[in-house]
Amino acid sequence: MNVQFKKGVLELCVLALTAKKDCYGYELVEAISNKIEIAEGTIYPLLRRLTVDGVFSTYLKESTEGPPRKYYKLTERGREMLADLTDEWMRFTDGVYAVIEEGRK
């Protein structure tokens, strides 16, 4: 898949997954990479930036499989951002589909 397509949508994917439940970084990598081919290193800088921007709060939770894991919890600001990005994405994809269909006629 085109790298630029993926870059623009990863933020939305991370927000959507954390809206359902708090997640740790590798859990997000796995969930997204099951649907979209991504490099693990693309998610962590995004998580750091969104945390600094107040989109996530974080906490550590003990793990039975190694050191404690850092979990990301969507803040109210993050939920607002998710709603805005989702609306934007839907308008964008509707427009793209309309253009593609027009080109097929």
Image (cartoon, rainbow, N blue to C red):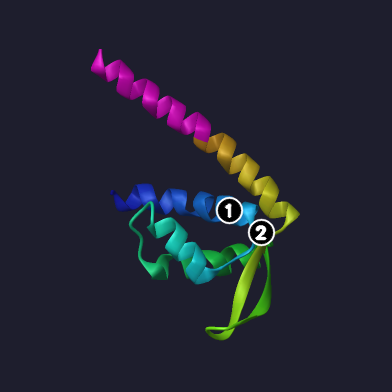
Picture mark count: 2
Q: Earlier in the sequence, mark 2 or mark 1?
A: 1
Q: Is residue 98 visible?
A: yes
Q: Residue at x 50, y 51 (%)?
A: 13
Q: Position of residue 97 (x, y in %)?
A: 38, 26
Residue located beneath label 2 in the image: 55
**Which of the labelled discs sits on residue 15, or is there none?**
1
Q: Position of residue 6 (x, y in %)?
A: 38, 51
Q: Residue at x 32, y 19 (%)?
A: 101
Q: Amino acid at mark 2?
A: Val
- The answer to whether residue 67 is left or right of residue 26 is right
Residue 91 on the magenta span: yes
Asked whether the residues under the numbered discs 2 and 1 touch, taking CB atoms below 8 Å apart as contact, a structural biologist would say: yes
Where does the magenta region start and end? 90-105
| Mark 2 vs mark 1, CA separation in Å | 9 Å
As drawn, 56 above or below 105: below
Q: Position of residue 55 (x, y in %)?
A: 66, 59
**Which of the labelled discs sits on residue 79, or is there none?**
none
SS of the residue under disc 1: helix
Q: Amino acid at mark 1?
A: Leu
SS of the residue under disc 2: loop
Is the stretch drawn in magenta largely helix, strand or loop?
A: helix
Front-most of residues 73 and 92: 73
Q: Is residue 45 visible?
A: no
Seen from this angle, which residue lies furthest top? 105
Residue 16 on the magenta span: no
Circle 1 crowding by C-alpha within 10 Å: few under 14, some 14–19, many from 20: many
Q: Position of residue 42 (x, y in %)?
A: 42, 65
Q: Residue at x 57, y 50 (%)?
A: 16
